[in-house]
Image: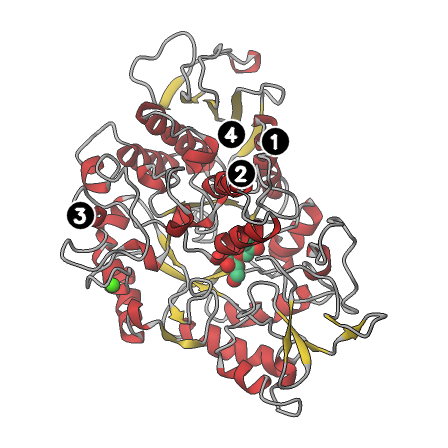
Amino acid sequence: LVTEKWWKNSIIYQIYPASFKDSNGDGIGDIPGIISSLDYITSLGVDVIWLCPMYDSPQIDMGYDISDYQSVYGPYGTVQDMEDLISECHKRGLRIILDLVVNHTSDQHKWFQESRSSKTNPKRDWYIWKPAKYDANGNRQPPNNWRSIFGGSAWEWDEKTQEYYLHLFCVEQPDVNWENAETRQAIYDEAMEFWLQKGVDGFRVDTVNMYSKHPGYADAPILDPKSETQPAFSLFCNGPRIHEYLSEMNEVLSKYDAMTVGELPNTHTLEGVLRYVSAAEKQLSMVFQFDLVDLGHGKDYKFLTTDPGWTLGELKAAVKSTQDIIRGTDAWTTVFMENHDQGRSVSRFGSDKTPEWRVRSAKMLAMMQSTLSGTQYIYQGQEIGMVNAPREWTIDEYKDIDSSNYYRMVSKVSNNDPVALETAMDALQRLARDHSRLPMQWSDEAYAGFSPATSAKPWMRPHDNYPEVNVKLQEKDGGSVLEFWKKMTELRKQYADLLVFGDFDILDEENESVFTYTKSSRDRTVLVILNFSDRSQKFETPETLKGEWKLLAGNVDDIQEELQAFEGRVFLV
Ligand code: TEU
Ligand code: CA
C-alpha cells in the first residue's frame, strides 16, 4: 500500500462554492467561507477537496461557462483568496483539486468574442463553425440534428457572420475546437499551468470524453420522431482523437504529479473505460462512470413523463461495472453517489419518508460507499444526510438552467396543461440538479447558518428541514449521520487493504431487497449486508463464510434476527 499513488487511498470532499458558506452576507457562498470551514472538513477524515468552478463567469451554467480561466468570479473572491485557500489546505495536510472545464467556454470569453467577430479573425477556428443547410423550400437548417444536453438544437445561428456554432450544452457555452493545436496550447497554459503553478494538486476534468467530435458531423439516428433534434451522444463522445488529446494533456499534468478524475458520461464498456484509466495508457488517474447515478433516468434524456424507477438488480450491476474496472487490471476507479448534478442519494436510493428512515438509510448508504474499492467522494451535505427539496416547492425555487429549460419545454409542448406541468414537477423533484445546490445546512440559525442572520436571502432557498438536519446538531449527537460518516471514514482507513483495495464479489445477485457482497484481500474478508427495502428481511448466513465474525459497523441499536428496514451490517470474517 505504501507504494501506491496518494490519490488511491484518499477521500475527496466536493465543494460547490455558491452553496457552501457565505462569509460576507451577500447570499452567495465564497472562498473565505470555505477557508473558515477547513477544520470542519478535516474533522471528517477527508484528504482532498475538489472545488467546483470558481472562475470568472456570467453564471449561465453556474460557472461551467468560464469567461476567464485566470480570474475568480467576483462574489466568490479573488485570485489572492484562492492562493490563501491553497496554502490553508496544504497547511492542514489537505490537498485541493479544481474543476477543469475545457470542452467549451462562455460566449463572453475573449477567445469567443474574437472568434465570432469575423470569418477571417485569427481565432475563428478556435470554435466549431459550420455553414447552414437549406431544405427543399429553401429554409435555413442547422448543420445536423444534434440535440443540446440542455434541450433544443446544439447549433446556434450567428447573424453577423452567417454561420452556426456548436454548443453541446447551453447557447452561451460554445464548444472549443480541439482540432486546433494553438487552441489546445492556450488551454494547457491558461486553464492548467496557471493553477498548477499556484500549487493545486490536480483537476476534476469536466466532460472528459467530448473534446473529439466524430468528423463529418453526421445526423444522429432518429430516436424521438416527434422532435426536430435527436440525442447524439455516440457522435460527440469518445471521438477518434480523444486519446491523443488526453495524452498531450497528461504531459502537462505529469510535470506536476497532478491527479485527475475525468467525468465520463455515456461510456459503458469495460474496454472503453480502460482506455481512459489504465495506468499504461497514461491518460487520467480515474473517472466518474455514470452507471449508478443514471438509475431512474431516461436513457437519452433524463427527465421522462413517467418515472422509470430502478431495481436493486440494476443498482448491483451498476456498482459491479465500476468495481470491475480494477479487477486484474492496472486501472483505478471511483466511488460516489452524489455530486452537483444529481438529486440527493438518500432521496433517490434510501428513503426520506420519515426522519427515522432518513437517518438509517443515510447510514446504510454510507456503509456501502465506505466499503467499495476506489477513491471515495463525498459531496457537501451528504455527510449530514441532506435530502431533495420538498415536492411542495414551486418552479420558482429551481434555479438551474437544465430545470428551467425542461419546464419551459413542457409548458410549450403541453400548452400549459396543468397535469403535464405537475408531472414535470414530479420529475424535477426526483432528478433536478438543484437539489444538491441548496445551501449547506450548518446550524438551526437563520438561513441554516449558511449566510449570517443579518444578510440578504441566500441565492437558493434553504431546505425546510434545516432545524433538524444540520452540522451543529449532529456534531453533538453520537447517533447522527455525521458521526456515523466519521466512523466509516476511519474504518475505511483502518481496513484499506480490504475496503479501498479489496476484490469485490456479489453474493446475492438475484435478491431484489438485500445487497450482500464481500471485499477480500489475500487472507481476510469483509462481508457487507445492506437492506435497501423499507421492510424487514431475512438475514442469511452465506454458506462459504462460516467462521468467526466481528461486527465492524451497523446502523441499528437493537440488532435482531431479521434485518430491519434499511439496516446495514459490516462484518470482518
Ligand atoms: O456535466 C456534464 C454532463 O454530461 C451531465 O452531468 C449533465 O450536467 C447532466 O446530464 C444534465 O442533466 C458537466 C458538469 O458537471 C455540469 O454541471 C455542467 O453543466 C456540464 O458539464 C457543462 O459544463
Ligand atoms: Ca458571500
The type of residue carrying mark 2 is Val
Q: Residue furthest left?
A: 454
Whole-angstrom CA distance, mark 4 to mark 1, is: 20 Å
Q: Is residue 498 left or right of residue 315?
A: left
Q: Are marks 3 and 1 in contact (CB under 8 Å)?
A: no
Cβ atoms at labels 1 and 2 below 8 Å apart:
no
Disc number placed over residue 446 in the picture, else none: 3
Q: Is residue 150 left or right of residue 451?
A: right
The residue beneath circle 1 is 314
Q: Residue at x 39, y 51 (%)?
A: 396
Q: Earlier in the sequence, mark 1 or mark 2?
A: 1
Residue behind mark 2: 419
On the rendered structure, is 40 left or right of 8? left
Q: CA distance from mark 1 to mark 2?
A: 30 Å
Identify the secondary structure beneath mark 2: helix
CA–CA distance in space, label 3 to label 1: 41 Å
Taking 130 as reference, is 503 left or right? left
Residue at 30% across, 67% down: 76
Q: CA distance from mark 4 to mark 3?
A: 44 Å
Foreground residue among 66 and 291 = 66
Q: Amino acid at mark 1?
A: Glu
Which of pointers 4 and 1 indicates the residue nearer the eye? 1
Q: Mark 4 against mark 3, which lies toward the viewer? A: 3
| Amino acid type of the residue that numbered disc 3 sits on in the rendered structure | Ala
